[in-house]
């Protein structure tokens, strides 16, 4: 095992430095991903609002069906972080191997319905025939690369849980640069390749996943990563059961999250293609702020899990609050800049006055919610890092389903404008922030992982 991993776990007494050391590579990696996403929107947006709506629909359906994969990733994060905190690096390697095998099986099982029933999935939003057809092709093509997506998700989660956020960063830089070149080439065609439109964007994304997966596997099997290959004896019933027990609430949460998003988007789609496209563009623009929260979420999950593994619950609590405070300050600052230039950014991405108008309104509304979103991102990550994956599920059900979808449905029934539908987002984040702050403050999450270990000791 490389000495650098031991070094990572010996500096846990410098909380703010460690939070930033873990957060900044994840922030930069996700920021690059968001910038590439904006470039992709710009490229696809040149085909019109319908093309943007198709890509938004395809991406949303694809990620809705990855809930099980995200469950495995959540279980991997909690178990690897605990093992590293306890300096049991062999166990961390074995957990990673088990997670990867389970993830690959799930990826293959998910690929089949995505290819066969893509048209039915895309059709639930009631968009026009051409938009729905393009969205279906997007889903089919990107689903071909499910296994590559699984490899990326599991190995990057394991590395971050072990304290290595830099390797996912440089792999992300490489693959995203390749991705944007492929998007331009495959969407518009050239050099013997016909113009593929929206489907070309999906293929470009998939090929970038495949490239990243090959790099990860090459480094992993070559012994170049901080988490090793588990080898024989990794695939035990106890590890699989514990991975599922910790991860499945996160998977259910993601399923609820994605279904709630689909219901919300269905209501947005009721107001037409322009409203739908504005939502997709607005989220992509503000993702430049979201990625900051995700970075601190990763840092919080890693340090909370490692401190719990080292039997230091107070240190875990301290790191969680500090990560949350840093996320709030960073997201508010960045979103303020985005709000100030929202119209210029939106008009750069698409030449449609109505889409631009609605995008600016959406950005203003979601900009108000940034402090609440920072709390949700970071504290949810901290709870999952501790193995408490059930409570974020409850918060998502109450906030997303109860508040956001409930309010949006009510506003639609009342015949209010789409601006009110966008505003339902604020109610969602208020509910989730209040619930998560109360849970983390209570400290009840500190016993969840220990209870799970006791539950499965009989499988040794």
Image (cartoon, grey):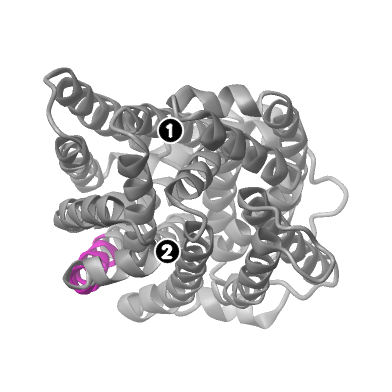
Report if residue 327 lies within the magenta region: yes
Secondary structure of residue under mark 1: helix
In which quadrant of the rendered view does residue 448 lie?
top left
Residue stretch in magenta: 321-337
Q: Left or right: where does residue 398 sit relative to residue 165?
A: left
Where residue 403 appears, as percent x and y from the top left, is 20, 29
From where the camera sits, is residue 52 visible?
Answer: yes
Predominant secondary structure, magenta span: helix
* Quadrant holding the C terminus: top right
Q: Is residue 326 above or below residue 300?
A: below
Label 1 vs 2, first from the N-terminus: 1
Distance of label 1 from label 2 (alpha carbons): 22 Å
Where residue 237 appears, as percent x and y from the top left, is 74, 31
Report if residue 122 lies within the magenta region: no
Residue marked by disc 2: 303
Where residue 72 appears, as percent x and y from the top left, is 60, 41
The residue shown at (21%, 58%) is 360
Residue marked by disc 1: 253
């Amino acid at each position: 095992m490389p000495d650098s991993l031991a070094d990572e776990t010996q500096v846990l007494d410098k909380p703010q430095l460690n939070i930033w050391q873990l957060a900044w590579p994840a922030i930069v990696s996700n920021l690059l991903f968001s910038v590439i996403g904006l470039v992709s929107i710009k490229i696809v947006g040149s085909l019109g609002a319908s093309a943007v709506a198709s890509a938004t629909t395809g991406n949303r359906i694809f990620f809705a069906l990855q809930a099980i994969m995200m469950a495995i990733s959540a279980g991997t994060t909690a178990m690897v972080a605990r093992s590293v905190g306890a300096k049991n690096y062999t166990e961390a390697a074995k957990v990673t191997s088990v997670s990867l095998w389970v993830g690959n099986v799930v990826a293959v099982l998910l690929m089949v319905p995505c290819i066969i029933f893509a048209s039915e999935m895309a059709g639930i939003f009631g968009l026009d025939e051409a938009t729905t057809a393009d969205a279906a092709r997007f889903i089919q093509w990107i689903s071909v690369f499910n296994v590559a997506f699984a490899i990326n998700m599991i190995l990057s989660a394991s590395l971050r849980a072990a304290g290595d956020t830099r390797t996912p960063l440089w792999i992300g830089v490489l693959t995203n640069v390749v991705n944007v070149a492929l998007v331009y080439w495959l969407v518009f065609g050239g050099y013997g390749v016909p113009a593929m439109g929206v489907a070309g964007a999906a293929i470009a994304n998939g090929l970038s996943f495949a490239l990243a997966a090959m790099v990860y596997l090459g480094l992993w099997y070559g012994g170049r990563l901080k988490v090793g290959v588990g080898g024989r004896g990794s695939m035990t019933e106890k590890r699989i059961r514990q991975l599922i027990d910790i991860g499945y609430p996160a998977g259910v949460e993601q399923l609820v999250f994605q279904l709630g998003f689909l219901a919300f988007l269905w209501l947005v789609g009721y107001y037409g293609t322009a409203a739908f496209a504005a939502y997709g563009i607005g989220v992509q623009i503000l993702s430049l702020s979201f990625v900051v929260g995700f970075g601190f979420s990763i840092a919080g999950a890693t340090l909370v899990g490692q401190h719990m593994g080292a039997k230091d619950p107070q240190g875990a609590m301290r790191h969680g609050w500090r990560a949350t405070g840093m996320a709030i300050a960073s997201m508010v600052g960045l979103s303020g800049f985005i709000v100030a230039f929202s119209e210029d950014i939106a008009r750069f991405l698409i030449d449609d006055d109505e889409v631009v108008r609605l995008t600016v309104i959406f950005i203003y509304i979601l900009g108000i919610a940034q402090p609440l979103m920072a709390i949700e991102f970071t504290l949810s990550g901290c709870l999952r890092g501790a193995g408490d994956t059930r409570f974020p599920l409850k918060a998502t059900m109450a906030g997303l389903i109860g508040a956001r979808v409930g309010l949006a449905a009510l506003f639609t029934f009342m015949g209010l404008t789409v601006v009110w539908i966008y505003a339902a987002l604020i109610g969602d984040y208020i509910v989730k922030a209040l619930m998560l702050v109360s849970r983390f403050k209570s400290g009840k999450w500190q016993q969840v992982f220990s209870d799970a270990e006791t539950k499965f000791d009989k499988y040794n």
